Image (cartoon, rainbow, N blue to C red):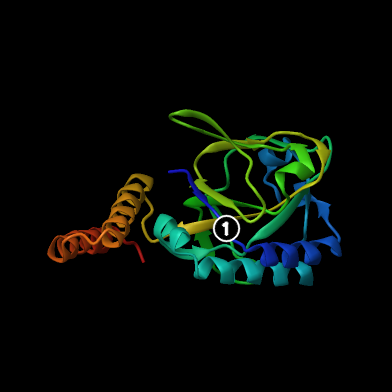
């Protein structure tokens, strides 16, 4: 399931994050890549230990906690602290699949990467190229969103970032371990939750909505892995 989350960050939050990044020292992104990914990765990344990275990461996490679409689409159990990368002209990240398990920095805890997320911080007019290309059963999807918008997609997807040819592309990226590990089951729950909210806004019959809501929670109860 590929979902766009409009306005994951407000314009003010985007400005705040970008101000933090502008004063930070980025490093070679290959330092945090696996062996095979490092062979196709050419970008810059903000070290997780950088105070600016921690401040910006906390801001993003707080914004996601209040976003109902993010909650509905991911059913988050654990969220990896957001990381930040930068692509300058000539930089790209070739075809790769994200690691299945990530260790949360500074802790003994590991996270299963069910869902990948990219949060765009640079406006589209600030750079050329740099599209996120996600491959699935229905073909390739080119994603290039306004600053503050985010895309989520199965972490098992083959994906890449095309070369930037002008300007600078800044983004946050991270992973989510969902309460429901199966993407097909998450999609069914997301569609059902979306329908419940739409029917509620239209004043649908209360008893019918109650039955549908009960079905949603009983399915979640059946599939949740906590």
| Left or right side of 48 for 220 | left
Q: Would residue 49 be seen by someone viewing this image from the given angle?
A: no
Q: Nearer the viewer, residue 94 or 211?
A: 211
Q: Would residue 202 be seen by someone viewing this image from the given angle?
A: yes
Q: Residue drawn 77% across and 49% down? A: 86
Q: Is residue 44 above or below residue 20?
A: above
- Badge 1 marks a residue whose secondary structure is loop
Q: List x then y, in percent, for residue 165.
A: 81, 33
Q: Residue furthest left?
A: 207
Mark 1, other Cα within 10 Å: few <14 / some 14–19 / many ≥20: some
Q: Residue drawn 43% across and 43% down? A: 1
Q: Quadrant of residue 103?
A: bottom right
Q: Is residue 183 above or below residue 134?
A: below
| Left or right side of 70 for 48 | right
Q: List x then y, in percent, for residue 181.
A: 38, 53
Q: List x then y, in percent, for residue 140.
A: 54, 29
| Left or right side of 223 for 138 | right
Q: Residue drawn 20% across and 59% down? A: 204
Q: Quadrant of residue 90?
A: top right
Q: Residue drawn 38% across and 61% down? A: 179
Q: Residue furthest top?
A: 139
Q: Which residue is mark 1?
A: 7
Q: Is residue 89 above or below residue 148?
A: above
Q: Is residue 73 above or below residue 61?
A: above
Quadrant of the drawing holding the C terminus: bottom left
Q: List x then y, in percent, for residue 16.
A: 74, 68
């Amino acid at each position: 399931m590929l979902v766009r989350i409009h306005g994951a960050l407000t314009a003010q939050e985007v400005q705040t994050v970008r101000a933090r990044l502008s004063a930070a020292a980025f490093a070679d992104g290959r330092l945090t890549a696996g062996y095979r990914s490092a062979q196709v990765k050419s970008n810059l990344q903000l070290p997780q230990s950088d105070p600016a990275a921690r401040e910006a990461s906390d801001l993003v996490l707080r914004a996601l906690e209040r976003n109902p679409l993010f909650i509905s689409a991911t059913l988050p159990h654990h969220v990896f602290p957001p990381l930040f990368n930068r692509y300058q002209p000539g930089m790209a990240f070739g075809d790769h699949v994200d690691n299945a398990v990530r260790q949360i920095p500074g802790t003994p805890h590991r996270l299963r990467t069910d869902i990948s997320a990219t949060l765009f911080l640079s406006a589209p007019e600030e750079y050329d190229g740099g599209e996120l290309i996600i491959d699935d059963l229905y073909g390739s999807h080119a994603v290039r969103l306004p600053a503050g918008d985010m895309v989520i997609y199965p972490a098992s997807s083959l994906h890449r970032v095309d070369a930037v040819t002008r300007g600078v592309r800044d983004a946050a990226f991270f992973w989510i371990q969902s309460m429901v590990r199966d993407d097909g089951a998450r999609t069914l729950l997301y569609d059902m939750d979306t329908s419940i909210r739409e029917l509620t806004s239209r004043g649908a019959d209360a008893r019918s909505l109650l039955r549908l809501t009960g079905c949603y929670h009983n399915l979640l109860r059946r599939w949740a892995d906590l």
